[in-house]
């Protein structure tokens, strides 16, 4: 269901940036005992400056779950992140999203209906003997409904930091694994575990049996849903080659949502937390070209003026859906709370939440 953002009106859109920030600080002071503001690393600095907690999506949801004395968790990120926070939050807490159109195109590429159809096809042709034969693994960048599908079938969620470990668990658990929605995290994780290329198949949405023959499906160990991150697809092998020519001593670090041909040329790869840690722990004067969302790269540049930090690509790589969240939306949300009105609450139905929590808990047990 598409959530519709209310029009804030001229009263808000006519405000200047400085006034918006001043009013946000005033509201935060007034509501301090009731709110917790969480910001993902890819969020713009305009919002990030107000964060009580920052991190990647799952870290934020887990950290927020430890906070029991704030009624309102304001999640400056995208919809699936707010859903995870609601699943892990205490029953009396409410999760709010500044802008309801802040979504994730990758998460939207794997709908429960399409995934269920894929499983039905595999069952009908005998690739699976039962509905639980193929172990499902879903990246945390997925809907609560898909996480519930995975939990119902005893699968697991994974993150960009533990994808290899979760995939290893899944391969040991069953003969085959279906990994969604990000084909690149899945392929990079499978390659790191030494799974042969001919045993890793890309499932093409909308094609019968994902575009494969029975023979290739029988031979496969890992099926990858053909989803991807629009931001990380913008990084190309040529970007790395160009940096090597210009700066032979530069370190290239990328996110594992990047395609495999990019990852094989990089010096390091890892989650947003791993990228931050690598830069923070490097010596003064070190040079970095980073393949991930531009807001994080810009923030690292400001935080580490003693190091030379660049975006790997030549053009800006921004998560435009997350950028729907702007300071003016946060101000509107806080103004409504101050007036006793709750806006933009993200809730997950209890039946879905129970099964989705099961897949999240399985990941935590593996880790």
Image (spheres, helix red, strand yellow):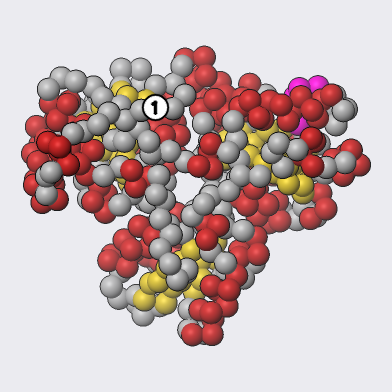
User: Which residue is nearer to you in this view: 363 or 136?
Assistant: 136
Mark 1 Cα-neighbour bin, 10 Å: few <14, some 14–19, many ≥20: few
Residue 235 spot, x, y in % from top left: 53, 64
| Magenta stretch encompasses residue 29 | no
The residue lying at 63 percent from left, 21 percent from top is 152
Provide the residue span drawn in magenta.
130-134
Magenta span main SS: loop
Answer whether residue 198 is visible to the viewer in this image: yes
Count the numbered circles shown: 1
| Quadrant of the frame with the C terminus | top right
Outermost residue to the right: 215
Residue 128 spot, x, y in % from top left: 83, 28
User: For residue 168, what is the image quadrant?
Assistant: top right
The residue lying at 40 percent from left, 44 percent from top is 321
Residue 224 spot, x, y in % from top left: 70, 44
The residue lying at 57 percent from left, 67 percent from top is 236
Q: Please give the residue where the numbered disc 1 appears in the rendered image.
A: 3
User: Which residue is nearer to you in this view: 265 or 70?
Assistant: 265
The residue lying at 50 percent from left, 42 percent from top is 105
| Magenta stretch encompasses residue 132 | yes
294 w.r.t. 62: above or below:
below
């Amino acid at each position: 269901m598409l959530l519709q953002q209310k029009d804030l009106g001229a009263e808000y859109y006519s405000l200047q940036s400085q006034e918006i920030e001043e009013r946000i600080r005033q509201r935060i002071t007034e509501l301090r005992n009731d709110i917790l503001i969480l910001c993902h690393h890819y969020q713009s600095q305009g919002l990030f400056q107000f964060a009580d907690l920052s991190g990647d999506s799952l870290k934020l949801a887990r950290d927020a779950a430890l906070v029991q004395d704030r009624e309102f968790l304001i999640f400056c990120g995208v919809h699936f992140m707010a859903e995870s926070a609601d699943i892990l939050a205490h029953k009396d807490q409410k999760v709010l999203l500044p802008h309801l159109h802040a979504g994730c195109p990758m998460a939207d590429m794997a709908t429960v209906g399409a995934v269920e159809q894929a499983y039905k096809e595999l069952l009908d042709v005998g690739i699976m003997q039962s509905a639980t034969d193929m172990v499902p693994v879903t990246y945390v960048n997925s809907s609560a409904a898909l996480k519930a599908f995975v939990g119902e079938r005893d699968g697991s969620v994974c993150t960009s930091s533990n994808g290899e470990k979760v995939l290893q668990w899944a391969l040991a658990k069953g003969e085959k694994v279906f990994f969604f929605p990000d084909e690149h995290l899945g392929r990079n994780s499978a390659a790191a575990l030494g799974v042969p290329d001919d045993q890793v198949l890309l499932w093409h949405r909308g094609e019968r049996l994902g575009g494969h023959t029975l023979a290739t499906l029988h031979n496969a160990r890992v099926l990858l849903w053909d989803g991807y991150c629009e931001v990380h697809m913008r990084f190309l092998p040529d970007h790395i080659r160009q940096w090597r020519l210009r700066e032979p001593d530069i370190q290239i670090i990328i996110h594992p949502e990047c395609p495999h041909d990019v990852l094989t040329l990089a010096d390091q790869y890892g989650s947003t937390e791993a990228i931050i840690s690598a830069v923070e722990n490097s010596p003064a004067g070190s040079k970095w070209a980073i393949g991930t969302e531009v807001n994080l790269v810009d923030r690292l540049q400001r935080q580490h003026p003693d190091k030379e930090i660049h975006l790997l690509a030549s053009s800006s790589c921004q998560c435009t859906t997350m950028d729907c969240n702007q300071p003016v939306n946060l101000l509107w949300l806080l103004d409504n709370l101050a007036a006793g009105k709750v806006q933009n609450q993200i809730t997950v139905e209890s039946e879905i939440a129970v099964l989705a929590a099961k897949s999240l808990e399985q990941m935590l047990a593996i880790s």
